[in-house]
Image (cartoon, grey):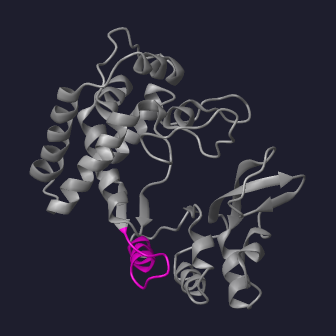
Amino acid sequence: MSKIAFIIDIRRQNMIEHLMYKALFELSADRAEFLSRLFSRPRQADARKDSSAVVLFAALRATDPDTEMFEDNLAAIKHRLIKEHGFPLTTDDERNLEYVFRAFFVGGPNLGYPGPNQTVRQGALRILPTYEELMTDTDEQGQPRSYLATEESFATLQQFEKNNLLVPLVGDFAGPKAIRSVGGYLKEHNTTVAAFYTSNVEQYLFMSTEDWKSFYTNVSTLPLDSKSVFIRPLINTGPGGYTASPQFRIGFRWDTLLFPIRELVTAFDAGTIQSYYDVIQMRN
């Protein structure tokens, strides 16, 4: 596991959500309590330490959300962040905190990208998974890998949060501060970037003639080695074919692929990167 993780997002609400998670990790003794608090649903008395995530979510779905629990948990989160940690949350921050937390309360385990009230018409293709599907999914060998898969996995991330090693930042990938500041911190601590998850941010940066160039210039300032990789989710269109297009078709699937960062920086410096499709051709 990485020594420290920085999460950079241009939306301040994303930082607030990660602080909400931090508080919930610190307040919860185990996975069952964490899920109970996250979704404001009563904890199942028979939840066991060796229960699978599938079992935990099945029990969760069998319970109804509790308004009093929601209010109590929201108050506990605010107290943890503001009073105990001393984070100076603004009125807007507190409003966004309640907005995000309420989404989990309303949406429950079925919460998805469209929001807490997502509906999918019968026969329609749903591109993105629900929260429960993410947490109960398995790898290609059928092994569960989410942080809720086992108590050990949960405890590892919980300790990471308690040690303040997951750091959410508000910043622009193409801006002059966020990425360079992280790079400066890593250099001061004599360490390198192991992985950089880009999500779909690069696709948006390529909509500007300059933003993608600024991003890769920022990346070139990071402390890298031969093992440093980008992690990118791409749509698999068939044998050997990948696309960044958001247009989905039946039979397509998401793949998560690794790309050497140093090779990208070298290609960018040489002027051979001109589009996002040039980027995704450089996979391992």
Can you tell which quarter of the image residue 170 is in? bottom left
The magenta region covers 170-186
Q: Which residue lies furthest to the right in this view?
A: 239
Instruction: Where is residue 128? Give x, y as percent.
Output: 60, 45
Residue 257 seen in render: yes
Q: Which residue lies furthest to the front in this view?
A: 121
Instruction: Where is residue 222? Give x, y as percent.
Output: 52, 77
Q: Nearer the viewer, residue 248 or 141?
A: 248
Residue 37 in the magenta stretch? The answer is no
Q: Which of 82 and 110 is in front in this view?
A: 110
The C terminus lies in which quarter of the figure?
A: bottom right
- Relative to 114, is 231 above or below? below
Residue at left 52%, top 34%?
135
Residue at left 46%, top 38%?
111
Residue 88 seen in render: no
Residue at left 53%, top 21%?
54
Instruction: Where is residue 247? Give x, y as percent.
Output: 71, 58
Q: In this view, does 229 lie to the left or right of 156?
A: right
Q: Which of 116 and 19 is in front in this view?
A: 116
Residue 179 in the magenta stretch? The answer is yes
Q: Give the number of marks.
A: 0
Instruction: Where is residue 83? Give x, y as percent.
Output: 9, 50
- Relative to 149, is 212 above or below? below
Q: Which residue lies furthest to the top in this view?
A: 46
Q: Is residue 106 left or right of residue 89?
A: right
Q: Is residue 61 left or right of residue 73?
A: right
- Relative to 99, is 159 above or below? above
